[in-house]
Amino acid sequence: MVDIKRDVGKRRPAFVRFGAPAVLLTVAALGFCHFKPSSPRVPAGSLHIGVVRAGAMVVEVRAAGTLVAEETRWIPAATDGRVDRILVRPGDTVGPDTVLVELTNAEVARAAGDALLEVQAAEAEMRKLHLTLERQALSQEAVVASARAEHAEARNRARADAELAQVGLTSALTLQAAQGREQQLRVRADVEQKGLELLHRSERTELEAAESRLDRLRSTAALRGQQMEALAVRAGRGGVVQQIAVEVGARVSEGTNLARVAAREPLEAVLQISQLEASQIAAGQQVLVDTHQGIVTGTVSRIDPAVQNGSVTVDVRLPSQLPRGARPDLSIDAAIEIDRIDNALHTGRPVQARAQTSIVMFRLSSDGRTATRVPVRIGRTSLNAVEIVSGLRAGDRVILSDTSTFDRYEQITLTD
């Protein structure tokens, strides 16, 4: 049996063999936890740098919208018909007599023609009636004249017989007969005169009845004519065509809206404001409206109480003189002046800034080589500026660009 010799003195204890690596791993882990990543290097030219200033600050709300005519009118069809032609397009400028749409209606055309023929026939009947009545009047006037002549002759005869009877040259019977004839012819002349007067009254009655009928037919013809003219649908006022609501070949009934025309002036701005910012809007506030052809100053005239799709509609009254090219439906941008702070610490608006919130910003060192994270309290916000409540001082330079990619760094290095 061979004894194996063991080197007991060189054997390592278990805690040395297994504990030492564990200690090394622990130390390494602790070192990693306390390791700070090196600051990133960012070109200064790619950043938007702002300066904190003290002074007056205007609080504004930005909004988009359109120019809208204060007076807009739908043009309806005045009669039934079929759309034959559409002579204008949205955006065209029209006058009161500009024809927008032409309609056709065979029944209206036939009725207008029949009504005109009836008027012509009635006018012919009226002329014939005038001639008939005039002939009757002349005939009766002749009868009256004859009766008066006979009465005058009988009256003269009676007077002559009366003179002869006084000297005994004629008998009393002859005188009595002459006087009786004179009285008879006088009554006849009076009756014929009354007959002439009655004929004149009858003529007036007949003429009034005929004229009334003719007027009625003329009114009907005028109405039919208006219906014919209404087949050519006119704007009725000057303005800009905003919408054509029909197509060629469509059948329309009386009262159907065919086109919408907006007056070129006066115009107002209609803005869409976020419901979160709408609470700051009040009537009378000043608004700068950019028509992309010029900027004009208006005032808030109305705020819609309802919220639609997260926005509130705000109407802005504009001056009468607007930049060239201003017209209904033109897209515009606007800035509403909410408030003016006479003495405020403020800077340009950071990308992530919201009113009455705390954010983190990078403040530049005095040499501009590095920027360090600092907590900043934001007060009121404006279109291009924010109020600084705490965290910065006047003269500090800060990065206004989006720095969300540097959130895990305490400091960044700016390079040329």
Image (cartoon, grey):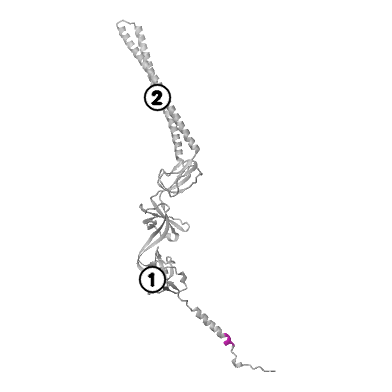
Location of the C terminus (image quadrant): bottom left
Q: Rate crowding at label 2 as few (under 14), some (14 to 19) or many (20 or more) other CA atoms within 10 Å.
A: few
Mark sitting on residue 397? 1
The amino acid type of the residue labelled 1 equals Arg
Q: Quadrant of residue 121?
A: top left
Mark sitting on residue 201? 2
User: Tag 1, which secondary structure?
Assistant: strand
210 vs 96: above or below = above
Q: Residue furthest front?
A: 416
Magenta-highlighted residues: 14-18
Q: Position of residue 408 (x, y in %)?
A: 47, 73
Residue sitting nearer the eye, 78 or 3: 3
12 vs 114: above or below = below
Q: Position of residue 37 (x, y in %)?
A: 47, 76
Residue 232 seen: yes
Residue 200 part of the magenta segment: no
Q: Position of residue 206 (x, y in %)?
A: 42, 26
User: Tag 2, which secondary structure?
Assistant: helix
